[in-house]
């Protein structure tokens, strides 16, 4: 049986702070707004919050470019507001985790400013290389966001490496002084009382010695030389041994390009260096590796991804469950169906919330927010989207390119949370920093709080069930009919309890099939999104049956 740790019983809510709730009327979401909404988050049944970065930052990557790790940005309310939010969480029995972004800093961080001037001890804090003959780049690696991974710095007279935006220089984690700084950051926040960290692209921090050219990858050149690099386990072990082991906290690592077998080398409960992992396979049922290479949604691909993580981690490691976050477009617009907005929103919730692991809900997901579709590409804010629009698919018409952005852009999911039907969706009394999705009069929290059949109330019910039924948290998992391309069916079992989850992903009636050995006699239908159960499953119908012996 799994060892129990507190995070296994929890449901987290992810806050992308700029767009969550503005408390001071300046048009930007902030911690005062969060403070107002703590009871709302709690009312959902969530007992933890993950904050996307709230540190001082020039905002080149909406906060993932940090200029000071030991402070809170003034526009979010500074340390004063943060302490109130932290206390507010703890008073309500909720945990709070921070985003730790240490693969890179902002180029406006003091370390970078000193490093480019070669002021010790910062000279080797980043990855600097001289130009090759004729000004040649040090290698052929791509940035994950814009162009090549190297930018020339006039001050230092060298290139610096940035795996993401130009304004996000990569730290040189091979330098022990950098690792000491990381540990100081961790201790600072843990001593203040935070309960853990989500670690941004943490498996990119160790680069292959010599930074060799990449000849294999057609896109994201270089990735095999910095993903799961040579010292990754050693550095993570060091952070654990020197810091995490001394606190009651947990770590959640973001890991692109990982499969369950390799994941176990990080999150195995006996030998791992971290507690949970954000994997990307569950996000690839309608694309190849990135949202910018879209394919038709395949339910079978989604099921396969879910099932393989469920099965391979069972009893050995703990899953992190999610279907949305700030890096992907809204899930109903992708895996669901906007025409069957309510039904598919509920089916998607059911498909993942009854698996084993700790679920995360991204702000607005609980009311079924949909993709934002701007009319003008200039309206995009995100650095990656702007680059993709301006430099990729140039043979396509501007209209086609724009439509591709609707489908792939992270900004599709970064519009302000729709609190009510008032101006600016109740997000701010000021001028919103970003566009509000025009559908806010139909889709908003206030309306759904009143409607017993809303997506929001469905989430509350599903979360309540997972909290009260141990089989959801600790039972074994089995998928049924894996080849069925319309219906996702799985069961969970533990002695004395059994659960069957059936989710249709079809916009037409689909066959309802019971797996061998299951009989509805003696079962209770504990959750569904249709008033009555027909022989056939209705479009996007979901059902959860429960047996107790
Ligand atoms: C992953 C984060 O989730 C994303 O938002 C960010 O842009 C990149 N890492 C770079 O920090």
Image (cartoon, rainbow, N blue to C red):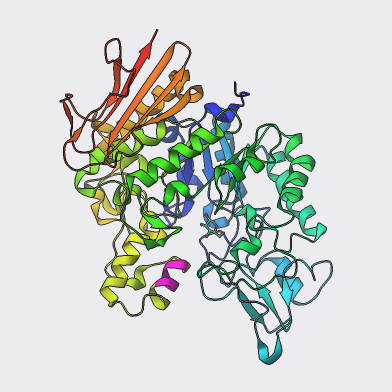
Viewer-proximal residue, 49 or 318?
Answer: 318
Q: Is residue 125 placed above or below 43 in the rendered structure? A: below
Q: Main secondary structure of the magenta part?
A: helix
Tell me residue 306's x, y (percent): 44, 39
Question: Can residue 260 be found in the magenta stretch?
Answer: no
Q: Name which residue lies at 51% across and 70% down.
A: 218
Residue most extreme to the bottom: 134
Looking at the image, can residue 262 be seen? yes
Q: Name which residue lies at 25% across and 34% down.
A: 454
Residue most extreme to the top: 549
Range covered by the magenta-colored residues: 384-388
Name the image quarter holding the N terminus.
top right
Q: Name which residue lies at 62% across and 60% down.
A: 66
Tell me residue 271's x, y (percent): 71, 36
Left or right, 514 with reference to 477? left
Q: Is residue 508 placed above or below 292 in the rendered structure? A: above
Looking at the image, can residue 433 be seen? no
Q: Image quarter for residue 397?
A: bottom left
Q: Image quarter for residue 154?
A: bottom right
Viewer-proximal residue, 303 or 63?
Answer: 303
Tell me residue 112's x, y (percent): 71, 69
Tell me residue 268's x, y (percent): 65, 36
Left or right, 284 with reference to 309? left
Left or right, 23 with reference to 346? right
Viewer-proximal residue, 355 or 53?
Answer: 355
Name the image quarter holding the C terminus.
top left
């Amino acid at each position: 049986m799994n060892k129990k740790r507190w995070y296994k019983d929890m449901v987290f809510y992810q806050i992308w702070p700029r767009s969550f709730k503005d408390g001071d009327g300046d048009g930007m979401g902030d911690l005062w707004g969060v403070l107002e909404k703590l009871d709302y988050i709690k009312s959902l049944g969530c007992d933890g919050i993950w904050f996307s970065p709230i540190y001082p930052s020039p905002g080149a990557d909406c906060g993932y470019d940090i200029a000071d790790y030991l402070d809170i940005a003034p526009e979010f309310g500074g340390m004063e507001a943060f302490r109130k939010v932290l206390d507010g969480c703890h008073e309500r029995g909720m945990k709070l985790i921070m985003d730790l972004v240490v693969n890179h800093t902002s180029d406006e961080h003091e370390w970078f400013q000193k490093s480019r001037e070669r002021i010790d001890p910062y000279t080797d804090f980043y990855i600097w290389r001289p130009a090759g003959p004729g000004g040649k780049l040090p290698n052929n690696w791509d940035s994950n966001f814009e162009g090549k991974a190297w930018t020339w710095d006039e001050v230092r007279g060298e290139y610096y490496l940035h795996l993401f935006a130009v304004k996000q220089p990569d730290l040189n984690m091979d330098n022990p002084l950098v690792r000491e700084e990381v540990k100081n950051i961790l201790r600072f926040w843990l001593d203040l009382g935070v309960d853990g960290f989500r670690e941004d692209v943490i498996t990119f921090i160790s680069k292959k010695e010599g930074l060799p050219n990449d000849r294999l990858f057609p896109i994201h050149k270089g990735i095999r030389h910095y993903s799961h690099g040579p010292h990754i386990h050693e550095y993570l072990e060091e952070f654990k041994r020197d810091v995490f082991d001394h606190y009651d906290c947990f770590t959640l690592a973001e890991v692109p390009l990982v499969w369950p077998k390799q994941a176990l080398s990080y999150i195995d409960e006996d030998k791992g260096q971290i507690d949970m992992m954000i994997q990307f396979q569950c996000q690839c049922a309608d694309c190849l590796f990135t949202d910018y290479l879209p394919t038709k949604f395949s339910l079978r691909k989604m099921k396969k991804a879910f099932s393989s993580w469920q099965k391979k981690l069972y009893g050995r490691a703990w899953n992190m469950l999610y279907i949305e976050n700030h890096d992907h477009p809204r899930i109903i617009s992708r895996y669901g169906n906007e025409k069957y907005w309510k039904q598919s929103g509920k089916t998607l919730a059911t498909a993942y919330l009854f698996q084993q692991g700790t679920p995360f809900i991204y702000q607005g997901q609980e009311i079924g927010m949909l993709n934002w579709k701007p009319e003008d590409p200039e309206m995009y804010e995100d650095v990656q989207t702007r680059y993709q629009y301006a430099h990729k698919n140039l043979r396509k018409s501007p209209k086609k390119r724009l439509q591709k952005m609707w489908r792939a852009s992270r900004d599709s999911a970064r519009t302000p949370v729709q609190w009510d039907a008032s101006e600016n969706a109740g997000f701010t009394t000021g001028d919103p920093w970003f566009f509000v999705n025009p559908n806010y009069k139909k889709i908003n929290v206030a309306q759904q709080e009143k409607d017993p059949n809303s997506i929001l109330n469905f989430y509350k019910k599903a979360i309540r069930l997972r909290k009260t039924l141990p089989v959801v948290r600790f039972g074994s998992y089995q998928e049924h009919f894996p080849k069925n391309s319309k219906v996702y069916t799985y069961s969970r079992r533990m002695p004395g309890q059994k659960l069957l989850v059936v989710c249709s992903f079809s916009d037409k009636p689909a066959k309802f099939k019971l797996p061998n050995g299951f009989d509805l006699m003696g079962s209770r239908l504990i959750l569904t999104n249709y008033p009555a159960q027909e022989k056939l499953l209705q479009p996007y119908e979901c059902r959860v049956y429960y047996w107790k012996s």
